[in-house]
Image (cartoon, rainbow, N blue to C red):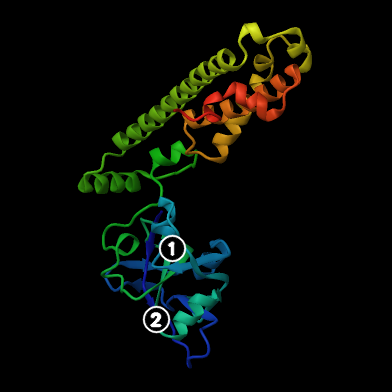
């Protein structure tokens, strides 16, 4: 089965104060002919109603069929919440319009409706409705779903397999898709392989970034230890102040590394150098506290010993 669209006139409101509550989705005819000459059978309208899944989205220009699969916005104009057969074969739908769409219809900014349905290729029999779209273009000039001779599918087998979405096609449908892709110059297998290569490259780049971060962190830790905790200053009093730990920085390093990673998570643009700088500032502050306790200095005096350049201007 392939998904196609057919334009039908949208009944205009009798006055500017009311948009139609019910809209005609399929005409009252067993044999349907589109404006572009395509033909379908609507001889089982009750089955169409029974097999259509509610609610059906009613969007703008079939955005849910074209834009949504690309990750683009596809706002709804309303929701078809109920279907019923009227007359012999006409299918009508009850619509819950959005306020924006209601105003646009009442202002006659949109005057046509284009339903999207699935049909059996061999018999051309309509099976179910899948969506509908507001439009001002007849199906002769619409693209994609309404383009003559080029019915489309939202997912091809290789892409669907990547996302574990089952797609079942008969031989005729598959041959039609292959021929269409060939005519358009699209090699789906190569595109799929490029997708896998791109994912592998992104994974390798992420792994390299993590390794670079680990190396930079280790180097920064050594710089802190040499600058602010030289072996000569690790006296017994100092060790007692920070918990009798001969190497307090090493003990607290995992905590600081976790903090750096949280900082980078909060700010993805934070570079490794900036993260290390934040780490160094934290370590300087802790060094000043430990030094002030060891030597009985004020916090400012401890900072003065650690950072003399910050307190004395050059002559």
| Crowd rating for badge 1 (residues with CA inside 10 Å; few <14, some 14–19, many 20+) | many
SS label for mark 1: strand
Classify the position of the C terminus by image quarter: top left
Res. 290 image quadrant: top right
Alpha-carbon span between mark 2 and mark 1? 24 Å
Which residue position holds label 1? 117
Residue visible at 32% across and 59% down in the picture: 144
The answer to whether residue 260 is left or right of residue 314 is: right
At a point 45% along the width and 80% down the height, the residue shown is 104
Q: Nearer the viewer, residue 173 or 283?
A: 283
Q: Percent position (x, y) of residue 273?
A: 47, 28
Q: Residue at x 51, y 65 (%)?
A: 57
Query: In front here: 309 or 42?
Result: 309
Does residue 281 lie above or below 166 as drawn? Answer: above
- Would residue 291 be visible to someone looking at this image? yes
Crowd tier of the residue under label 2, counting other residues whose Cα lies within 10 Å: few below 14, some 14–19, many 20 or above: few
Numbered label tally:
2
Indicate which disc, 2 or 1, sits on the residue closer to the N terminus: 2
Query: Can residue 255 be seen in this snapshot?
Result: no
* Viewer-proximal residue among 133 and 257: 257
Farthest residue to the front: give it. 315
Task: Tell me where residue 52 appears, x and y as whole percent.
Answer: 54, 63
Q: Which residue has dot 2 on it?
A: 109
Quadrant of res 63: bottom left
**Closer to us: mark 2 or mark 1?**
2
Image: 198 above or below 38: above
Q: Residue 303: name its quadrant.
A: top right
User: Tag 2's secondary structure?
Assistant: loop
Residue 173, image x, y percentages: 34, 48
Which one is nearer the viewer's eye here, 135 or 124? 135
Asked if residue 5 is positioned above or below residue 268 in the image, the reply reads: below
Q: Are marks 2 and 1 in contact (CB under 8 Å)?
A: no
């Amino acid at each position: 089965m392939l998904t196609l669209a057919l334009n039908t006139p949208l009944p205009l409101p009798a006055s500017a104060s009311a948009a139609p509550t019910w809209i005609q989705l399929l005409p009252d005819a067993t044999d349907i002919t589109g404006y572009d000459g395509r033909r379908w059978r609507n001889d089982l309208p009750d089955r169409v109603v029974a097999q259509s899944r509610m609610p059906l989205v009613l969007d703008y220009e079939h955005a849910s069929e074209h834009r949504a699969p690309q990750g683009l916005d596809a706002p709804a104009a309303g929701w078809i919440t109920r279907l019923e057969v009227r007359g012999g074969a006409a299918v009508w739908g009850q619509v819950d319009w959005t306020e924006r769409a209601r105003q646009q219809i009442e202002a006659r900014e949109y005057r046509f409706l284009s339903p999207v349905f699935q049909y059996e290729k061999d018999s051309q029999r309509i099976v179910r409705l899948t969506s509908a779209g507001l439009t001002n273009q007849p199906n002769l000039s619409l693209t994609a779903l309404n383009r003559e001779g080029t019915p489309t599918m939202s997912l091809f087998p290789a892409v669907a397999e990547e996302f574990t979405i089952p797609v079942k096609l008969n031989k005729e449908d598959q041959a039609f898709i292959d021929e269409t892709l060939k005519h358009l110059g699209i090699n789906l297998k190569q595109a799929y392989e490029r997708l896998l290569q791109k994912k592998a490259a992104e994974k390798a780049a992420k792994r390299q970034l993590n390794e670079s971060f680990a190396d930079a962190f280790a180097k920064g830790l050594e710089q802190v230890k040499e600058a602010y905790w030289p072996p000569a200053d690790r006296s017994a009093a100092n060790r007692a102040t920070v918990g009798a730990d001969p190497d307090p920085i090493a003990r607290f390093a995992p905590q600081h590394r976790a903090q750096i990673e949280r900082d980078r998570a909060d700010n993805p643009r934070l570079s490794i150098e900036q993260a290390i700088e934040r780490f160094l500032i934290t370590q300087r502050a802790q060094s000043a506290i430990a030094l002030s306790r060891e030597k009985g200095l004020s916090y400012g005096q401890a900072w003065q010993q650690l950072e003399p350049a910050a307190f004395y201007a050059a002559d």
